[in-house]
Amino acid sequence: MPKAIFPLFYLPNLYYFKQLLAYKHQPVLIEKQEHFPKQTYRNRAEIYSPNGKLNLSVPITRGNGNHTVYRDIAICNDTNWQHIHWKTIEACYRNSAYFEFYEDDFAPFYQKKYRFLFDYNLDLFSLTLKNLKLNIQLSFSDEFYTQHTLPDFRNTINTKNLQNYSAKPYFQVFEDREGFKGNLSIIDLLFNQGPQALSFL
């Protein structure tokens, strides 16, 4: 039986993985049936650029407006957003200690076209779990419930209430400019700390 329910994000932040770490070697439920909420990390990640925090947003199309189920949210591939994201990631992390170590794993996600955001995020998430050596058993919701008896992280990990969360400090490429930023995308931690990443969560 699942031990908790989580949303599925694009390159989730450190707080997400800190919560997930409590369920190492246990099954968790990934929400797939919710109506896609606006302005969340489901299609957005934050990285550290030379000018501070930078948002990377996956462009989407909504078939039924605000009532589109997450699993049916399509990626809008009218622009070359994947090329832009990857070039931005390269520019921000090329000089980090472990970028080249993970580069060949992540690069294909910015070349292969995906139709649905959920599938894209899930494949990236699975790769990230593998790179973290974090063994989490995943299952997926088959219907939506507003309330759950499980520990529920669907609405608690959001863009508004985590501003003050900070992981254990680690070296970041641009911290000499604006200081340490503690709740960025997991790729910031991976590219800077590599196999030691989990110890900082």
Image (cartoon, rainbow, N blue to C red):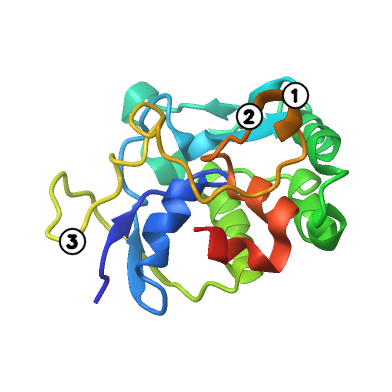
The crowding category of the residue bearing disc 1, from other C-alpha atoms within 10 Å (few below 14, some 14 to 19, many at least 20), is few
User: Mark 3 or mark 2: which is in front?
Assistant: 3
Spatial CA span between label 3 and label 2: 33 Å
Residue 1 percent location from the top left of the image: 24, 77
Query: Which mark is on residue 150?
Result: 3
Task: Kindly state the secondary structure of the residue where label 3 is placed.
Answer: loop
Figure check: 63 above or below 136: above
Residue 164 percent location from the top left of the image: 40, 32
Cβ atoms at labels 3 and 2 below 8 Å apart = no
- Amino acid, disc 1: Thr
The crowding category of the residue bearing disc 2, from other C-alpha atoms within 10 Å (few below 14, some 14 to 19, many at least 20), is some
Spatial CA span between label 2 and label 1: 7 Å
Query: Which mark is on residue 76?
Result: 2
Query: Which mark is on residue 79?
Result: 1
* Residue that appears at 58% across and 35% down: 181
Task: Kindly state the secondary structure of the residue where label 1 is placed.
Answer: loop
Quadrant of the image occupied by residue 117: top right
Query: Which mark is on residue 122?
Result: none
Cβ atoms at labels 2 and 1 below 8 Å apart = yes
- Amino acid, disc 3: Leu
Figure check: 130 above or below 174: below
- Amino acid, disc 2: Cys
Residue closer to the observer: 74 or 37: 37
Query: Which tag, 3 or 2, sits closer to the chain's start?
Result: 2
User: Mark 1 or mark 3: which is in front?
Assistant: 3
The crowding category of the residue bearing disc 3, from other C-alpha atoms within 10 Å (few below 14, some 14 to 19, many at least 20), is few
Residue 42 percent location from the top left of the image: 47, 38
* Residue that appears at 87% across and 43% down: 94
Spatial CA span between label 1 and label 3: 39 Å
